[in-house]
Amino acid sequence: MASKSVLTKTSITFLEKYLNNASPTGHESNGQKLWMDYLKPFVDKFTTDIYGTAVGIINPDAKFKVIIEGHSDEISWYVNYITEDGLIYVIRNGGSDHQIAPSKRVNIHTKNGYVKGVFGWPAIHTRKGDKEESAKISNIFIDCGCESKEDVEKLGIHVGCVITYPDEFMILNKNKFVCRAIDNRIGGFMIAEVARLLHENKKKLPFGLYIVNSVQEEIGLRGAEMIAETIKPNIAIITDVCHDTSTPMIEKKIEGDLKIGNGPVIAYAPAVQNNLREFIIETASNNKIPFQRNANSRSTGTDTDAFAYSNGGVASALISLPLRYMHTTVEMVHQDDVENVIKLIYETLLRLENNQNFSYFN
């Protein structure tokens, strides 16, 4: 298992379609539909909650419940103010980076579909070098080609419309996946691939497996908080992204020493249950799956925290995918790492199947 490629052409086609689809926080429904359609052949049933978290369930009648989870939402912007001459000022929806905005193209989501626009910026000729102003929330603006506020509103744009970037999926140097929103729709992709492998290899689990694609992680783990209370799991294995620290301007003494291509990242943090983490590390070692370690101070900043501290405490662990250029439109991961995260979660579930002493994790 550890040396065999797990991704198929169908897998990559789905990944491209899934990443290219916009799924901003609070507006994840179209992405969730794509994900559920892909996952449907591999699970016994589906459920969704009122805010749109989607759950595929294998063996739904089992009493012991294991969650594997990623989150489906991406960072975006909201229309916040429209000037009388038709320019649009924005606020964040999640951790959107103001420094990358100038000159980016955008899609403004309206009831009539997308309206195109651009983040404008003064030409270099007009900026004074010694007093050059940097991009910030208060001065970045969108131009959609209108000459008045009335023209903007005629396009269906109003305060509260969500704004996303249109940048699409590509592969660099044969094995680097690049796109916006890899954080963390790649997580939903990887847990779907685990379900596919279980189905194709005809594995029967003695516990209920809940494949969870949560909403609203980017604004505070909200989807995970809600679904944890609904499912009440015994174990939760979360997958998200973490920083590749090998590129310029990142301090390894602060951020740790992590690199794409070197394997999944296993987290150490108060929210990570020690026995479950060691079980996962043993699984990686037994199956010759490369991995890296990362220490998180106080919290992981991922849905792991929401699951761990729910329902009186849930044994939780975090397996991260190292990623370059987080919260930009050119987020980058290594295909080998994607495959190894899938393998590690898959093999961990099979070890759980053979290890009936679930009280070990309580």
Image (spheres, helix red, strand yellow):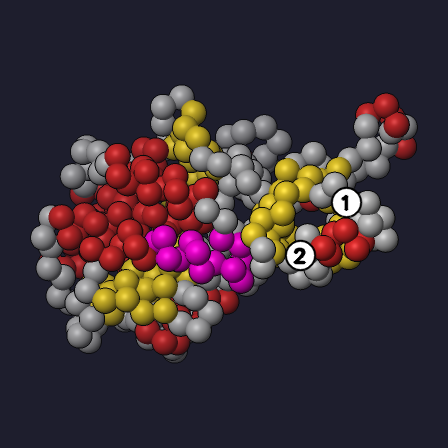
The type of residue carrying mark 1 is: Cys
Identify the residue at image location x=32%, y=57%: 36
The type of residue carrying mark 2 is: Gly
The residue closer to the viewer here, 66 or 37, is 37
**Residue 339 x/y as whole percent:** 29, 38
Query: Earlier along the polypeptide chain: callout 1 or callout 2?
Result: 1
Instruction: Find disc 2 in the rendering and name its residue.
Output: 156
User: From the viewer's perspective, is 148 left or right of 37?
Assistant: right
Alpha-carbon span between mark 1 and mark 2? 12 Å
Badge 2 density bin: few <14, some 14–19, many ≥20, Cα 10 Å: some
**Residue 165 x/y as whole percent:** 58, 43
Mark 1 secondary-structure assignment: loop
Residue 33 lies in the magenta stretch: yes
Residue 192 lies in the magenta stretch: no
Identify the residue at image location x=38%, y=49%: 187
Q: Is residue 159 above or below residue 227?
A: above
Mark 2 secondary-structure assignment: loop
**Residue 86 x/y as whole percent:** 80, 49
| Residue 210 visible in the displayed image | no
Q: Is residue 343 above or below residue 79?
A: above
Q: Do the CB atoms of the residues marked 1 and 2 lie less than 8 Å apart?
A: no
**Residue 90 x/y as whole percent:** 72, 53
The residue closer to the viewer here, 139 or 279, is 139
User: From the viewer's perspective, is 302 left or right of 105?
Assistant: left
Identify the residue at image location x=55%, y=40%: 166
Magenta stretch, residue numbers: 23-35
Badge 1 density bin: few <14, some 14–19, many ≥20, Cα 10 Å: some
User: From the viewer's perspective, is 361 left or right of 225?
Assistant: left
Instruction: Find disc 1 in the rendering and name its residue.
Output: 146
